[in-house]
Amino acid sequence: MTTVAAKEASKGKLRESRFKTEKGHERDQEKEMQIVHETVKSEIRKRPAKKNKGIVKEYRKAGPFCRVTFGLSKEAVGTAKKVSVVGDFNNWDKNATLMKRLRNGDFEVTIDLAAEREYKFRYLLDDSRWENDSSADRYTPNPYGCDDSVVIV
């Protein structure tokens, strides 16, 4: 074999070994990502259930709005079949914002609210029982002798 042919052959082996090393490295990264993904999934499953799911605010980049998710756990709701969130944002209409029962028994609804405002609200269970949100930003007295929850967005 000539020296030129030997050099070309060794280059081919070098390329082949680099390719194998890169492929092996990709497989290691894939395994590592799979382990991280499984760990995150198991941590999510381990989180204890909250008595009151609370309020989650997600500010929108486009426009002066905030997406607000109101949630009540099945423990907070008890045996109620119908839950609605009623407040300034829907003119206190008890049928305007019905909450959806989730598979786990919790209730949840997401609505867009104009930002830089405060909204009074309460939860109405089975059209007969009023509840406040324990994770409200604050509370304010109402004319009926109790307090309303307030969300500030």
Image: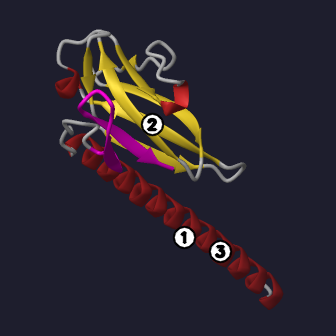
Q: Which residue is mark 2?
A: 69
* Residue at the outermost bottom position: 3
Pinpoint residue 12: horizontal percent, then vertical percent: 71, 74
Cα–Cα span, label 1 and label 3? 12 Å
Q: Is residue 43 left or right of residue 85?
A: left
| Mark closer to the observer (2, 1) | 2
Which of these two is toward me, 101 or 32?
101
Q: Which residue is mark 3?
A: 13
Q: Which residue is mark 1?
A: 21
Q: Secondary structure at mark 2?
A: strand
Q: Which residues are magenta?
A: 135-153
Which of these two is toward me, 48 or 77?
77
| Identity, as a three-letter code, of the amino acid under mark 1 | Thr
Q: Secondary structure at mark 3?
A: helix
Q: Secondary structure at mark 1?
A: helix
Q: Earlier in the sequence, mark 2 or mark 1?
A: 1
Which of these two is toward me, 109 or 29?
109
Q: Residue at x 33, y 31 (%)?
A: 143
Task: Give above or below for 106 relative to 112.
Answer: above
Residue 67 falls in image quadrant: top right
| Identity, as a three-letter code, of the amino acid under mark 2 | Thr
Which of these two is toward me, 11 or 105?
105
Cα–Cα span, label 2 and label 1? 48 Å
